Image (cartoon, rainbow, N blue to C red):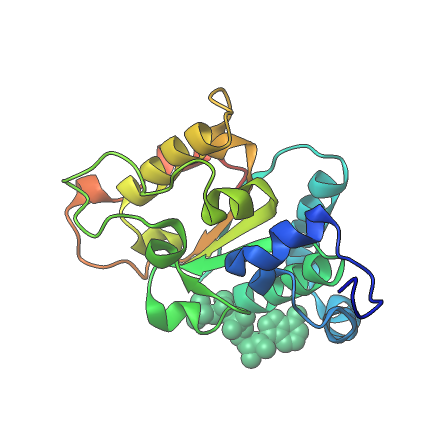
Amino acid sequence: MVVFGLPVPSNKIDGVLENRLLLEEMSYDREALKRQHQNLLPQLNIEQLSVYNAVTDSIENRKQILMFVYGHGGTGKTFLWTTIISDLRSEGKIVLAVAASGIASLFLPSGTTAHSRFKIPIDLTEKKSCDIKKRTFLADLLHRTSLIVWDEAPMSDRRCFEFLDRSLRDVLDCDDQLFGGIYVLLGGDFRKTLLLNSTEFIPMAVLQNLFTM
Ligand SMILES: Nc1ncnc2c1ncn2[C@@H]1O[C@H](COP(=O)(O)OP(=O)(O)OP(=O)(O)O)[C@@H](O)[C@H]1O
């Protein structure tokens, strides 16, 4: 760069360029996202808007939000996620959009499965946490993450949340806060659950205790 008289990138940018995971999350077309957000926001109904305001206010005020958005199919959860995600990503913030299944993740903007994103073990009986190590690209990404959106959450085994909680507390060195202090927005429909053993669900009472619903 110096030889060709070009500006040398700072060490900070070097870190981002090296980390493919971070680069992916920071390469969105922010102008296009801004336009998308400007188009979607005025269309939100009152309930969608109240969730939108709660999430954006909490991020602005740096007060952790743990929220569960419960709505049956077709009530506009994906529409709401897209509005929130386009807003935050247009401001350069990192939002990790995940879903319980691959099919559901396709409906989220740049969504992935929770298992793939957080390295949740396939066999949940074998381990006690996700395979996330400190000082890795994934740990760096999580350090910079503003919000996790987890769609179709009732379809995920409760151990997925427990493993992620445990791992984030460890990786983010924040043992006294749920999910290591990361803001978490869960959503889904309890009527759309797989026929699992009842001990594999997140009990409703636990959700009501920890999350705003
Ligand atoms: N506020 C809104 N204004 C206009 N259209 C909306 C609004 N909210 C939702 N929709 C439309 O309603 C339809 C269903 O919404 P959406 O897919 O977000 O529901 P969902 O709750 O995610 O459904 P599912 O749980 O089955 O995935 C979509 O076509 C979406 O564009």
Residue drawn 70% across and 47% down? 12
Q: Is residue 137 visible?
A: yes
Q: Is residue 73 visible?
A: no
Depth order, front residue of 193/127: 127
Task: Answer above or below: position of 5 versus 65.
Answer: below
Give the x, y percent position of residue 205: 37, 33
| Count of numbered labels shown in the rendering | 0
Task: Answer above or below: position of 186 versus 46.
Answer: above
- Where on the picture, by quarter, is residue 33? bottom right
Q: Is residue 170 left or right of residue 147?
A: left
Q: Residue furthest front?
A: 3
Depth order, front residue of 19/9: 9
Residue drawn 47% across and 34% down? 179
Give the x, y percent position of residue 155: 31, 56
Task: Answer above or below: position of 153 versus 1.
Answer: above
Q: Quadrant of ligand 1?
A: bottom right
Residue drawn 75% across and 65% down? 1
Give the x, y percent position of residue 204: 36, 39
Depth order, front residue of 95/52: 95
Q: Is residue 164 left or right of residue 14?
A: left
